[in-house]
Image (cartoon, rainbow, N blue to C red):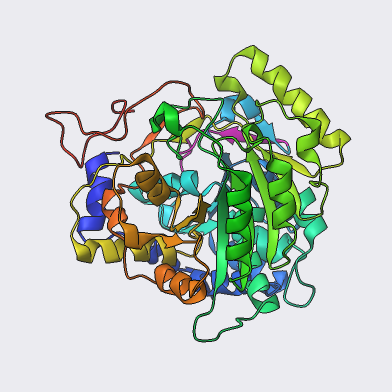
């Protein structure tokens, strides 16, 4: 797909192109209403919902990992026929539940307007890319498999609350990025100050700027940091930020602890224990690449029922020796009784945005905030890092790497005075200048965690700032 055309969607006031899909119906059910009901925590009556799928002549399920397999099993058990399974790992998977897996777009359908695509890829970054591809091929009847899972399979609801054990032990569960959990947490922790409610979505706690890998297309831009900036943040500063932040907000649906690589921080156990003193959040996910040797003492305290060590699977892009470290880490975590999850290897990964300023006008910046925060499935993930709270990973990177410094676009957490009101006003800002640096996704590339370094900071001479893709067209 032409990268410049994707970017131009924003300039033509079409940035939220999924609104067309949200206004569509599945039988008699409006998709937007269905999403809202699911995310509110209500249980969906399958006898009312499932018959609406019979409107479609073809139903295609895209994504055959844990989420897709679980949704497929549920639909088949309830006599919903799936025409085709799509996955970019088709050659590797061969078949699921006796049904052949095909590469996306390799099957003919009767009518695209009477074809439903169930997207069962829960990774938000990749899911956005899939939706762009579907739109370019004129598939507009799209529904999130994660919402089917939340509404029809997940046992957590308004009456019972969050079922921690189910969420941590079931691989399809969105855990950290679950909008259903956001609303359940909001109901459990109503605002202390109704004028400035602070019920947050997912919050990421960054513990360091160092990693044992050097991924070309790292969405945290680890390879862009200068050598002197690749460091662990002092544990006492991290605990100060934890105390100031979590004693101020009403709730957070979940917390991701990451870096860099969190297990490169010698005091990761103390950091997790400091978080666990608070009860106004759902889960903690410690996101690791899995190939940094974990020390037994780093797992002290991580057996709490709210903690999950989330292993990313980058093994296909790494030397054979990495697999031995990965397996040892899994065995160590199991031995200590810590909940853990393993992600699948992604054969296709996204190229993140360049970091330089593109000079976007204010009215476009306002639309971009709408795009990032108001799409049903995409929850903004604030980043708590070294005394500051940033609106997202990209904003954190632009500021921390030193590309720009918009001092009013992050909140100083080292000062407790008036923090509640400052956080509220920062979160509800009409736009951020840093959004003018963001070009969203720049396309896709083969395989996650391919090692190497590409410059995302500077625009080469003679290149157009809108169409330029670091590393070349993929």
**Res 47 → quadrant:** bottom right
Q: Residue at x 64, y 13 (%)?
A: 320
Quadrant that contains the N terminus: top left
Nearer-the-camera pick, 98 or 246: 246
Question: What residue sits 44% from the left and 56% below the top?
Answer: 390
Q: What are the residue bounds of the magenta stretch?
A: 98-108
Residue 286 drawn in magenta: no
Q: Nearer the viewer, residue 317 or 100?
A: 317
Q: Position of residue 447 (x, y in %)?
A: 50, 27
Give the answer, above or below, for where 273 lies relative to 432. above
Q: In the rendered image, is residue 162 in sight?
A: yes
Nearer-the-camera pick, 150 or 230: 230
In the image, farthest residue toward the left: 462
Residue 71 image point, x, y percent: 68, 52
In this rendering, is residue 235 above or below 255? above
Which quarter of the picture shows residue 245?
bottom right
Percent position of residue 61, x then y = 58, 47
Given residues 72 and 321, the one toward you in this image is 321
Residue 388, compared with residue 29, is above or below; it is: above
Residue 329 location (% of width, % of height): 75, 28
Whether residue 332 sits left or right of residue 283 in the image: it is right
């Amino acid at each position: 797909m032409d990268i410049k055309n994707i970017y131009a969607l924003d300039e033509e006031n079409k940035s939220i192109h999924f609104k067309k899909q949200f206004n569509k119906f599945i039988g008699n059910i409006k998709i937007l209403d269905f999403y809202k009901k699911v995310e509110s925590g209500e249980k969906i009556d399958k006898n009312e919902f499932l018959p609406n799928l019979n409107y479609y002549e073809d139903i295609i399920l895209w994504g055959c990992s844990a989420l897709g397999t679980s949704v497929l099993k549920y639909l088949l058990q309830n006599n919903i026929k799936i025409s085709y399974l799509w996955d970019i790992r088709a050659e590797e998977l061969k078949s699921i539940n006796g049904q052949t897996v095909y590469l996306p777009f390799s099957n003919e359908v009767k009518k695209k307007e009477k074809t439903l695509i169930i997207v069962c890829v829960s990774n938000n970054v990749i899911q956005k890319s899939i939706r762009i591809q579907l739109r370019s091929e004129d598939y507009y009847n799209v529904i999130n498999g994660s919402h089917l899972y939340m509404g029809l399979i997940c046992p957590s609801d308004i009456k019972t609350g969050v079922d921690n054990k189910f969420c941590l032990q079931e691989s399809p569960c969105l855990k950290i990025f679950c909008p259903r959990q956001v609303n359940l947490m909001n109901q459990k922790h109503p605002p202390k100050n109704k004028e400035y409610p602070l019920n947050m979505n997912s919050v990421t706690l960054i513990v360091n700027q160092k990693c044992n890998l050097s991924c070309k297309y790292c969405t945290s831009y680890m390879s862009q940091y200068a050598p002197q900036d690749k460091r662990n943040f002092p544990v006492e500063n991290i605990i100060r930020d934890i105390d100031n932040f979590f004693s101020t907000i009403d709730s957070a649906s979940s917390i991701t602890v990451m870096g860099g690589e969190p297990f490169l921080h010698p005091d990761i156990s103390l950091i997790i224990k400091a978080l666990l003193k608070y009860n106004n959040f759902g889960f903690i996910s410690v996101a690791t690449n899995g190939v940094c040797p974990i020390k037994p003492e780093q797992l002290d305290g991580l057996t709490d029922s709210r903690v999950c060590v989330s292993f990313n699977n980058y093994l296909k892009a790494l030397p054979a020796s990495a697999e031995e470290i990965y397996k040892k880490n899994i065995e160590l975590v199991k031995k200590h009784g810590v909940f853990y999850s393993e992600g699948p290897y992604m054969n296709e990964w996204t190229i993140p945005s360049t970091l330089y300023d593109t000079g976007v006008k204010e009215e476009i910046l306002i639309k971009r905030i709408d795009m990032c925060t108001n799409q049903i499935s995409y929850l903004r993930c604030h980043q708590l890092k070294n005394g500051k709270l940033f609106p997202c990973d990209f904003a954190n990177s632009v500021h921390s790497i030193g590309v720009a410094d918009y001092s009013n676009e992050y909140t100083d957490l080292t000062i407790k005075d008036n923090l509640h009101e400052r956080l509220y006003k920062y979160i509800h800002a009409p736009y951020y200048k840093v959004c003018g640096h963001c070009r969203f996704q720049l396309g896709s590339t083969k395989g996650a965690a391919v090692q190497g370094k590409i410059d995302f900071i500077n625009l080469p001479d003679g290149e157009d700032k809108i169409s330029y893709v670091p590393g070349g067209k993929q």
